[in-house]
Amino acid sequence: MTPTPVLELKNISKRFGGLQALKNVTFDLYPGETHALVGENGAGKSTLMRILSGVYSDYEGEYILDGEPTLLRSPADAQARGIGMIHQELSVLPELSVAENVFLGRQPLTPWGSIDWSKMYRIADEELGHLGFEINVKRPLEDYSLGIQQVVEVLRVILSGARVLIMDEPTSALSPAEVERLIELISTLRQQQRSIIYISHFLEEVMRVADRITVLRDGQKVDTLKQEDTSVDHLISLILGREVNATLPSATEHEDKQTLLEVRDLCSDAFNHIDLVVGAGEVLGLYGAVGAGHFDVARALFGMYRVDGGVIILDGHEFPQRFSASYAIKRGVAYATESRRKSLMLEEANYRNITLPHLGRIARIVPNRKREVDIAEPAMQMVNVQPPDPHNAVGKLSGGNQQKVAIARWITFPPKLFVVSEPTRGMDVGAKNEVLGILRNFRNDGFGVLVVSSEPETVLAVADRIIIMSRGQIVSELENQGNLDKDALMRLL
Ligand SMILES: Nc1ncnc2c1ncn2[C@@H]1O[C@H](COP(=O)(O)OP(=O)(O)OP(=O)(O)O)[C@@H](O)[C@H]1O
Ligand SMILES: [Mg+2]
């Protein structure tokens, strides 16, 4: 006897104004199953999950929960029916203790109506133990890594009664070791007969966790496959619907590489004694686990992280001890942060987000909308922002397309030095290559690029040299001439 699916979606269609985000999509999920959902940026994955979790109720098609046609009216409604969403931007409160976060809003009470702290600590401790984590639940959550914070969020969703857990790109901000722990956690959840929907652009990971995989393309379902009947390459061809050209523009040799950036003995509360050099026409990779301090070094080069000592010299000019982001831009530094939410104005149009750092150059006195659009449009085309309308608000783009806008900013007026943290986070296989290709072209044109990342694949793909940071210190420096692999980098952390 085949078991009844926990949920079934039949012929789901969803429009946003003139845009057909989903068309006749069918999807089902069985108890104890991990069902992965993959597809290009903008394929409709998050939209489908928002329907599943009660965010959107205006769609066509049928939603069948435990065999019954259902209309969920809100996320709270979905939660009450056992469907929980793990948000990528975690909804934890870092200053509160681990235990308080586990129970957020549902703290156990004593018969007298006050919070039952000892019960709360005990249950949080036991439940985390069941999931394989030994953590001091009285300590503030912010003392723990992002990976642990995510585990706490998972536990909270489970304790609120979730049988179905939706994870939308859960690993994109985790270090490799944390990804391993999440994969173990998923297998524990599966043994508890919970069902998981797993969205990711990391197809190796998908092949490890999923029982079945559904591929979406342009809002339509391409296929649902059993894990054992497919492979990473097969998935890529289904996702893109064409062959992918994975080769980057080749790296041209530069005669006498001039030093562009020199950093000496840079110190702050997050890193110490950082010495590094980026040549004109060179990509330097700065690699470390999440929390190693490498992202803060990037911020410091843009005047956004307070340093206590050290020297930054760009193109022969020494920066003052304190400087602003606009000073850094004037000197020729561009910076794209790892968190797109922080760098984009989600309510504003794409073109405005792209021209923002350059307004002084484009229109000295009054903003000139037409010029801005003329500048933004080709930049959007170069990174293939979909849909390509410059007047669209950035907030309406899919996650990966928002990231492309953040990169497109720096194409028209290339800086001398481009500092970019997690350049391909959240991007699909095709878009990753496009962006890495753009960085390679910056380099070939003689600019300097500093790629800061916790994804070994990213630095290995584009960097000429790789500096590895651990606990705020540089621990090694390697030439990257095709002789390194992921394991080699991770061993040095
Ligand atoms: N609130 C919205 N208003 C208008 N259009 C939207 C809205 N949300 C999503 N879209 C559009 O619907 C399409 C599907 O977006 P969705 O976020 O589901 O993609 P995704 O598969 O999750 O992509 P990604 O991998 O980049 O996260 C995209 O074209 C997107 O621009
Ligand atoms: Mg998405």
Image (cartoon, rainbow, N blue to C red):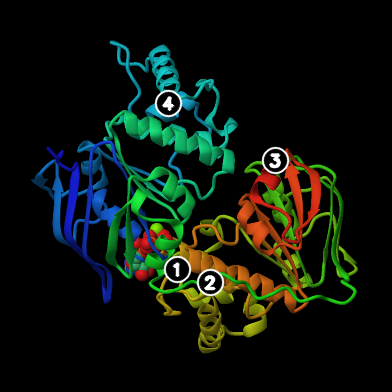
Q: Amino acid at mark 2?
A: Asn
Q: CA distance from mark 4 to mark 1?
A: 38 Å
Disc ID at residue 268: none
Labels 3 and 2 touching (C-beta < 8 A): no
The reply to whether residue 379 is visible in this rendering is yes
Which residue is labeled 3 in the image? Answer: 491
Disc ID at residue 394: 1
Q: CA distance from mark 4 to mark 3?
A: 26 Å
Q: CA distance from mark 4 to mark 2?
A: 42 Å
Q: Between 321 and 213, which is closer to the camera in this rendering?
A: 213
Q: CA distance from mark 2 to mark 1?
A: 8 Å
Q: Secondary structure at mark 3?
A: helix
Q: Is residue 391 above or below residue 16?
A: below
Q: CA distance from mark 3 to mark 1?
A: 39 Å
* Sequence-earlier tag: 4 or 3: 4
Disc ID at residue 353: 2
Q: Secondary structure at mark 1?
A: helix
Q: Which quadrant of the figure has residue 247?
A: bottom right
Which residue is labeled 4 in the image? Answer: 131
* Sequence-earlier tag: 4 or 2: 4
Q: Between 128 and 466, which is closer to the camera in this rendering?
A: 466
Where residue 100 appears, as percent x and y from the top left, is 43, 26
